[in-house]
Amino acid sequence: MRTHAGRTLVAAHDGTAAALGVRRDMTLAEARALLAPEEPHVEPFRPERDLHALQALAVWALRFSPVVALDPPDGLLVDLEGLGRLAGGEQRLIGILADAVETLRIGVRAAAADSVGCAWAVARFGHAVRTQVPTGSERDALAPLPVQGLRLDPGLRDGLHELGVETIGQLLRLSHAELSARFGTALPLRINQALGRVIEPLVPIEWHNPPQLERSFDGPVRDLETIMLATRATLDELVAELVSRGRAAWELRTELISTDLPPTIITVVLSRPSHEAAHLWTLLRPRLECASLGFGIERIELTATRTAPARRDHQAFWLESGGARRQPELDEKLAELVDVLSSRLGARAILMPRSVASHVPEQAFPLQPFAGGVPPQPGAADVAARVERPSKLLAPPEALRITSHARALPDRFGWRRDDHHVLAWHGPERIAAPWWASAPRHGARVDPRETRDYFRVHTTTGRALWVFRELDSRRWFVHGEWI
Amino acid sequence: MSTHLSPVRSRTAVQELERLVRSRQQAPTSFGAVCTDWPACDALISAPAAGESLPQRTDVPGLARGVLHEWLGLEHARPGGAPHSSSRDFARRGTLDRWTPPLSLLTHLAEQALRQPMGASTSGAGWVLWIGRRVWPYGRTLMGQAVVRESMTGSRRAPVTRDDDALCSFDLEWHAREDARHAEQLFSRSLLLDPAHDEARLWAIDGALRCPGVAAIVADGSTLSMVATRRLQLAAAEGGALALIARPPWEARELSAATTRWRVRRAPRSPRPDARVPMRWQLQLLRAKGLQRVRRPGMS
């Protein structure tokens, strides 16, 4: 579904829905009414995700032809020139291709023709799901199809509709000169493209296999040292390969293929791309040492599954001045440190503070895993920036016992088995709980929905505590300390 | 297998080694110092300026980079009672609550380390690593909400009393900062590390100290042995970061390879509170390696 002018419309649907009368650009409410009592599965329409999937499908289709082009939003153009004989005819090749796509659970209409325009029209508007248009019969194949098959602008299509021209056959009977006078050059160009009179080049997608190197042993090897040496040598070669391509590894996959066990796969993910073999090795080696070798390893495969453009070394010449260490270099060193730390401590153990627009002290500064050298912006700092907060926050807040009152506020209280004599109170600062706060868990000591009055309390022992009182229940808690 | 060297060749090899060792001993790499912005402290402690060898050395005031500084934290003590009398109760609650590092002071020092670039050899800003959950300050503290200044109002203008075992002691105060805008660097350049156990923590501190991209380290140093501190000292000498190790107050008698050792105490309040002075701590220098004589201005 998609939203247009405040209405929710159907952007795409499946065959079952079509059989019940659901059409594109129908409102969602109407579609639901048609499908009742079944509740349809509805998802928001995200064109960029569709395009991404189409690209993935194009890469997949490279197994049939070296030239595959995208035809967004829903088409792929595959150059089958000279490939028909491999499958025993183009008709059979189309069948194989369409069957393969259907095994991916994707509905497909396929057509082969000598021109891109003709194949486009027949695939979308032809009677059969899989068609092969023989050379020379484009005109016959196109004649019964509607004019939309010529890839026309909506304005042009409406213009033809006004004239009563509905099929391509009707259009072909008109003379070229009249058409260009009436509709400009776009329409004759489309007609010529469909008939194969104008060459239409394909822009094939570019695809590089991820850099991969492998090393086979003569027989199964169980000696860890040998495997380490071989992996190290392969890694060096892989890095040399990456450098020659101007890339740096972001994710490295090592596969140890053994005779009897499924392959051991070690994936090393870096916090920022690196083309330093030594650094990659420090990350890979401890993982390799723990790998199970089974009855022996026969082959080692190293793949740089994710790469990024390498930082150019010649940039360093311009940045360098008097041997000073520069910011990028420092950040790179830190990224290497983070890689090493997270490989042992786990990625969840290396965190960065973030600030969130929240008045609730527990929620104002959440922690997030380190995001690869990109310093987060202290975004919503304004909310919390003007208030004083303790340097240590207790989680959860700890209850305190009031032992004696002076006027409205207590002057003695017990906390953590200690008696505290109050010298001074500062406050209150009222922090209202957000109304959307979750309900208290059963037995929770602090109610997250309570409004709190915070005070800074100075005691005779020199402590400065951050204390609050729940507005309704009148219970007191210690929430932090200036320390 | 032993290689056979002629006597002459082996002697030259030994001489070469001696020369190498001597050159390393004579010119220890200096990373300079971080000015603490506390006059009493800066007057006491100094380090050779970065990149200079011994003969023409000029000292810069402050905490030296590339060496360990130990900070004994504050205990959750019972007034009047022995601190350890209730340790059983605390142990039941988990050891996390028995002591707290002096977070405001350490934050102040880390901020100073970030603001002062590491000598002439560096022109970029480094990072601050907080290792161990106990030394993680509340996020608001990292945004520069306050400055910790040496107390001027107190009766004790530093350095003064030579009570118990301290070389000197003076008071520090917490002041809310008027404009916090320029102090957000620390917030965006802090990494919080949470090693699962003591061994991983030692390893993480070691690795972090060796990294040249790190400007300062604030680490939980509880239960570190003498050997461990020596290892950390070597690591610190390699990276040149400001190494602040927080230790529990009862480890004051533990041996350590640290260059300085400081103790932080809560300064007791007078019964009539001064509303303008919010928080105050007493800072004591317990030990300073290489500090020959404490020179006290105003005393002869």
Image (cartoon, rainbow, N blue to C red):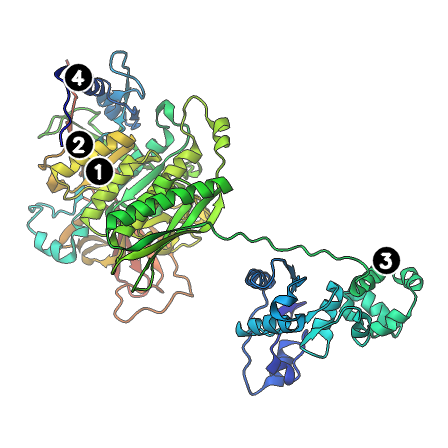
Give the chain letter at badge 3: A
Mark 3 lies on residue: A185
Element on which disc 4 rests: helix
Q: Are marks 1 and 2 in contact (CB under 8 Å)?
A: yes
Look at the numbered discs 3 and 2 and tell me whether their residues touch, using CB distance below 8 Å. no
- Identify residue type, mark 3: Thr
Q: Amino acid at mark 1?
A: Ile
- Front one among B67 and A152: A152
Q: Nearer the viewer, mark 3 or mark 2?
A: 3
How far apart marks 2 and 4 lie (CA) works out to 40 Å
Q: Identify the residue under disc 4.
A: B9
Q: How far is the residue under mark 1 from the one under mark 4?
A: 46 Å
Disc 2 designates what residue? B258
Q: Residues within 10 Å of mark 1 (few under 14, many from 20)?
A: many
In the image, farthest residue toward the top: B56
State the residue in front, A287 or A374.
A287
Q: Quadrant of residue B241?
A: top left
Q: Residues within 10 Å of mark 4 (few under 14, many from 20)?
A: few
Q: Chain of mark 2?
A: B
Q: In this orientation, does residue B144 appear?
A: no
For disc 1, the marked residue is B245
Q: Is residue B106 visible?
A: yes
